[in-house]
Amino acid sequence: MRNVYVLGTGMIKFGRYPEKTVPELGGEAALIALKDAGVTIKDIEMFACGNLYQSNAMVGQRILQQIGQTGIPVINVSNACATGSTAFREAYFSIASGMYDMAMAVGVEQMGKQGLLGGTGGGDPAYSTEGKLGSGLMPAVFGQAGIEHMRKYGTKLEHFAKISVKSHKHATKNPFSQYRNEVTLEDVMNARMVGYPNTLYMCCPTGDGAAAAILVSEDKLKQFAGGRKRPRIAASVLTSDPYTDRDLTLPDVNTLTRRASKLAYEKAGVGPKDIALTELHDCFATAELVHYENLGLCGDGEAGEFIDKKGGCHPDLGGFAPVNVSGGLLSKGHPLGATGVANICEVVWHLTQDERAKDRQIPNAKAGQAHVIGLGSACTINILTI
């Protein structure tokens, strides 16, 4: 396996673009990434496109119709919330394997106001959580994950609310975020309850967005980087859930990430204490809290103390283990196919001191990780180092 580097990145502001098509959104991000890398579409040898809602519409080929059709192979990826990051991994392996020297990954989605309401779907109705527990919808699934943590460790509603306060504050420094407003603890606690313990401000907004990355081999890096330091992909891991009796009736939001995290740290040769920033999948505040422990940022049962800032290791900007300094999904938004690549873009910008992260820059960042979970189907973790 060869070393693979991220030469350039591009992202549009997440929001709602009813006047644009999915290929137009993806094409815009792709052109930004090409310019950032200092290359053209003629230099790209392989293209991986992540899109969920139009997965049968050959979105990748339609993006190339916008920016240049050169006859290169196109892979269209659909993998739940991990769609974009899985496309990134396909581009990574195309270079690591030696098949190509330069590839592009684009994640794009146009959701408007559809909401993150996917159910279990397609399973045996005898084992449906909708019938057994009341709901298989995502707010209920991740609400249950929070309740389990509360029961097991005594976590309080305030701990989840503090995550929302933290992420909204971070978003004020990110011009790519869909929402850039601060909220108080009282605002979050008193907001409309969606799926206990998640109130409205503890749930991610949905909308439209696109992000792109140009990946290269070491030889191409020397040719195009122009002396700029570019991050190496130290690990790119994808897992799916193993079979458990629990999954028949109660989704497990933890095992998927724990297995991926262990593999990623081992492959990258780093540990949680080496990670300067983490962009994790906070579709709900409860998800972020449990992933603190799943990713080893704190010990089991210590997530409440972690968000309470007891000690120097805490997830706020300025802490030793900052999480979602982009504002995370809670503020940045969660256009499903775009999320995975957008998380990687954020990590790249901090590792390279990019102007796009200047107001929230983590100084001297040498390693960062981007995490996405597609419940029951996929977990990706990409660790980048400089």
Image (spheres, rainbow, N blue to C red):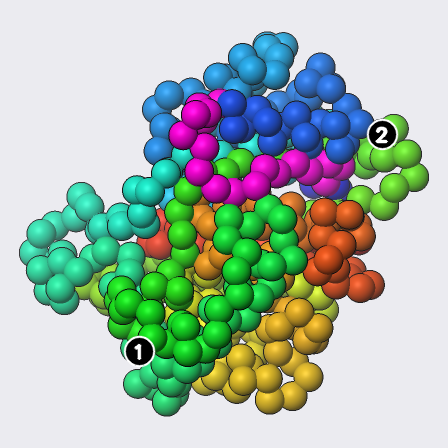
The residue under label 1 is: 148
Judge whether residue 336 can be spotted in this image: no
What type is the residue that disc 1 sits on? Glu
Dot 1 or dot 2: first in sequence order is 1
What type is the residue that disc 2 sits on? Phe
**Disc number placed over residue 111 in the picture, else none:** none
The residue depicted at 71 percent of the width and 73 percent of the height is 318
Mark count: 2
Magenta-colored stretch includes residue 7 = yes
Q: Position of residue 342 (x, y in %)?
A: 57, 45
Badge 1: residue crowd in 10 Å (few <14, some 14–19, many ≥20): some
Q: Position of residue 28 (x, y in %)?
A: 59, 27
The residue depicted at 80 percent of the width and 52 percent of the height is 353
Please provide the residue range marked out in magenta.
6-23
Question: Left or right: where does residue 55 sit relative to residue 96?
Answer: left
Judge whether residue 41 can be spotted in this image: yes
The residue depicted at 73 percent of the width and 19 percent of the height is 40
Badge 2: residue crowd in 10 Å (few <14, some 14–19, many ≥20): some
SS label for mark 1: helix
In the displayed structure, 36 sits above or below 274; it is: above
**Disc number placed over residue 224 in the picture, else none:** 2
Foreground residue among 188 and 45:
188
Question: Left or right: where does residue 103 sit relative to residue 79?
Answer: right
Q: Position of residue 190 (x, y in %)?
A: 34, 75
Foreground residue among 295 and 32:
32
In the displayed structure, 303 sits above or below 120; it is: below
